[in-house]
Amino acid sequence: MIAFIITFASLGRIYGQDASAEPARKGVELAKKRDYDGAAAEFTRAIKTSPKTAKHYSNRGKAYRAGGKFAEAEEDFTKVLELEPQNADAFGERGKSRVSQKKYDEAIEDLTKAMDLDEDDVDSHRFRAFAFVSKQEFDKAIEDYTAVLEKLPKDVEAHRRRGYAYVSKGDAAKAKEDFQAVLKLKPNDADATTRLKAIEGRTAKPGGSPAAADAPPAG
């Protein structure tokens, strides 16, 4: 779930009697209902009323990203950064939008900046890991998934995706550990069960190891 900056409780405090408050409020309400096109339209109204307010661009960008309009989202987060050059959230959101457009190098740059500004930004580690896997830079992806697990050791998907990265790298032992961790947290997980059996079957043979071709695509 994408977190929108503006909440109902904070609207009055942020805007007072600003005319942009009402469309901003409607935008948040529509976003909660997953009407992202409608939300974006309301945030556009807010922008027209208050074009120097970064929060409106940020919320519209999040509505665009949630609705799959990644290029439009990227443009809005770029505008946020013009207004607020040290906005960690905007770097993170633009990076995620760029990952979705397969602009991996630019995404990695943005996500790294987001984490430099906010050391608790776990999501940027996830998306940067995805970008690294897509570039077949598995060691760097593993570092990012490890960083996620240091903060969230029971994160099933981080274990799973780090396991995929280890498979792609050809490290059967480490991959096995991650898929075992998935099954400990989620005992009936069919994907982890299948992956673990495949690893055990291959490593049981002399010289056997999981092949990169057995790994799922990044994501």
Image (cartoon, rainbow, N blue to C red):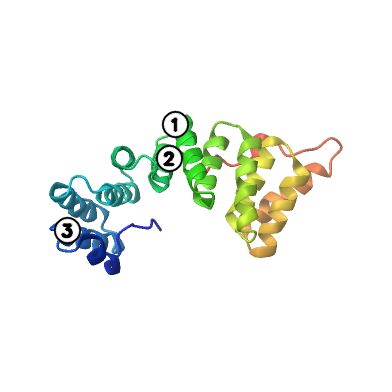
Where residue 187 appears, as percent x and y from the top left, is 67, 65
Callout 1: helix, strand or loop?
A: helix
Residue at image location 16% in from the left, 56% down from the top: 20
User: Which residue is more in the foreground, 69 or 126?
Assistant: 126
The image's mark for residue 106 is 1
Is residue 127 in view from this perspective?
Answer: no
The image's mark for residue 83 is none
Q: Of callouts 2 and 3, which one flags the residue occurring earlier in the amino acid sequence?
A: 3
Q: Of callouts 1 and 3, which one flags the residue occurring earlier in the amino acid sequence?
A: 3
Callout 2: helix, strand or loop?
A: helix
Where residue 48 appears, as percent x and y from the top left, is 14, 47
Q: Is residue 116 left or right of residue 189?
A: left
Residue at image location 42% in from the left, 46% down from the top: 88
The image's mark for residue 95 is 2
Where residue 15 appears, as percent x and y from the top left, is 21, 60
Is residue 21 in view from this perspective?
Answer: yes
Q: Of callouts 2 and 1, which one flags the residue occurring earlier in the amino acid sequence?
A: 2
Q: Tell me, yes or no, whether the two marked residues, 2 and 1, touch with CB atoms within 8 Å.
A: yes
Image height of 92 relative to 13, above or below: above
Q: Quadrant of residue 140?
A: top right
Q: Quadrant of residue 203?
A: top right
What amino acid is at disc 2?
A: Gly
Measured in 3D between alpha carbons, the distance from the residue under mark 1 to the one under mark 3, in whole angstroms, is 32 Å
